[in-house]
Amino acid sequence: MKHIIYILVSVAIISAPKQIENTKISPQCFKYFNLVIGQSRLYDMWDSYDIFMGQIEQESLCNEKITAFDHGMGLAQFMPKTAEWIHSKYYDELSKISYTPNPYNPRWAIRAMILYDKYLLDRVSCKNDWHLALRAYNGGLGNINKEIAKANSCNYDEIAKHCGRSKFSCDVNIKYPYQVFKRSVKYNLYFNPDQ
């Protein structure tokens, strides 16, 4: 599925280059590239390093010190309760970096994000679907699984029709995976320039 999305995004880049606003990797983001690759290898998620980089860029524009209006923190924009939960769930892994949740620490944030993404991929009702796992990351696993159940389908358009939150929240959540995938293309092309 990931490769189909890349093909679609790549076709969009080729056919409408003016619509892709920043296909170069910023130095701000590039400084996390090796850390993301190392952490993705550590958790057997090597083939998704580009999605992780796109996700970090989408979440924080690669600013490890940022706090968003909704209290999202650091590179991966963990909410306070989610940071506490993920730290307790993966304490053995995350306490090697920090004994307490530390979303402003790039190593903690990247490792926690990868572990959380892996958790979501395993638990979204349509298994191993990056699109839906990213929607769960952005809007909550419970919300996306309710939408899937109501749609009785793994079709993205059908699921989106059952978003039960505010129009603003639904719009942001439905667009989120596409924005991450769009940003991730440049990281894939950097590592695989012949594609």
Image: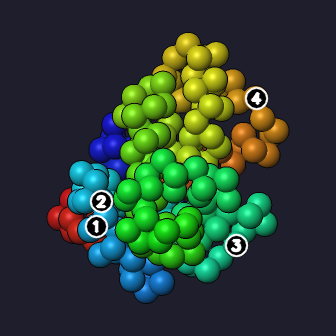
Question: Where in the figure is residue 97, as x and y percent of width and height?
Answer: 41, 71
Cβ–Cβ under 8 Å for marks 1 and 3: no
* Quadrant housing residue 2: top left
Cβ–Cβ under 8 Å for marks 2 and 1: yes
Q: Marks 3 and 2, Cα distance to the nearest angstrom?
A: 25 Å
Residue designated by label 1: 37
N-term mark: 3 or 4: 3
Observer-nearest residue: 36 or 26? Answer: 36
Cβ–Cβ under 8 Å for marks 2 and 4: no
Q: Secondary structure at mark 4?
A: loop
Q: Residue at x 61, y 63 (%)?
A: 77
Any part of residue 72 in sight:
yes
Cβ–Cβ under 8 Å for marks 3 and 2: no
- The nearer-to-camera label among 2 and 4 is 2
Badge 4 amino acid: Gly
Residue 67 marker: 3
The 10 Å Cα crowd at callout 1, few under 14, some 14 to 19, many 20 or more, is: some
Residue 139 in the image: above or below residue 185: above
Residue designated by label 2: 40
Image-based side of 168 in relation to 125, left or right: right
* Quadrant housing residue 118: top left
